[in-house]
Image (cartoon, helix red, strand yellow):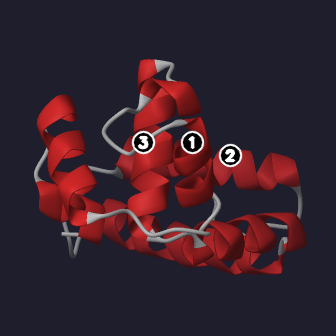
């Protein structure tokens, strides 16, 4: 693939596809150099995309425990009413909206329920 500036969504998609093809490339090879160059170009393009930048900023602003809890709820098809480990529907809603913190005993119960380490709720 010819390495060139990414100016359009089509260029961006093509670069991402090529990056996937090159993911196993070894360092200090022509393929490894191409991968590095494409990754730099993609990063520069993404930094200029206001919608993507806003999405990343919003995602980074969500506390780890809330992001994990939302992900688990989505994966398991759960609603606010399906998490007695936290409390009633209102309590779960307040936790998800950042009005209350997720208590240690709730973290321990959720970790047990989903088979994950409690530290994952703390970003560990």
Image coordinates of residue 103 in percent, x first then y, are 31, 64
Extreme-top residue of the structure: 77
What residue does disc 3 label? 87
What residue does disc 2 label? 14
Q: Secondary structure at mark 3?
A: loop
Name above or below for residue 55 compared with residue 45: above
The answer to whether residue 1 shows anywhere in this view is no
Q: Are marks 2 and 1 in contact (CB under 8 Å)?
A: yes
Earlier-in-chain disc, 3 versus 1: 1
* 35 lies left or right of 37: left
Residue at the image point whose x is 33% and y is 51% from the top: 23
* 120 lies left or right of 5: left
Q: Secondary structure at mark 1?
A: helix
What residue does disc 1 label? 17
Residue at the image point whose x is 26% and y is 70% from the top: 122
Image coordinates of residue 121 in percent, x first then y, are 28, 61
Q: Quadrant of the C terminus?
A: bottom left
Image coordinates of residue 64 in percent, x first then y, are 41, 67
Picture mark count: 3
């Amino acid at each position: 693939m010819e390495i060139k500036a990414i100016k359009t969504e089509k260029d961006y998609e093509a670069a991402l596809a090529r990056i996937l093809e090159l993911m196993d490339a070894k360092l200090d090879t022509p393929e490894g150099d191409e991968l590095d160059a494409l990754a730099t170009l993609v990063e520069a393009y993404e930094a200029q995309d206001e919608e993507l930048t806003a999405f990343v900023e919003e995602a980074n602003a969500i506390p780890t425990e809330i992001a994990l809890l939302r992900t688990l709820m989505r994966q398991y098809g759960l609603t606010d009413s399906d998490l007695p480990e936290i409390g009633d529907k209102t309590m779960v809603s307040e936790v998800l909206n950042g009005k209350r913190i997720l208590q240690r005993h709730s973290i321990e119960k959720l970790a047990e329920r989903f088979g994950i380490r409690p530290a994952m709720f703390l970003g560990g």
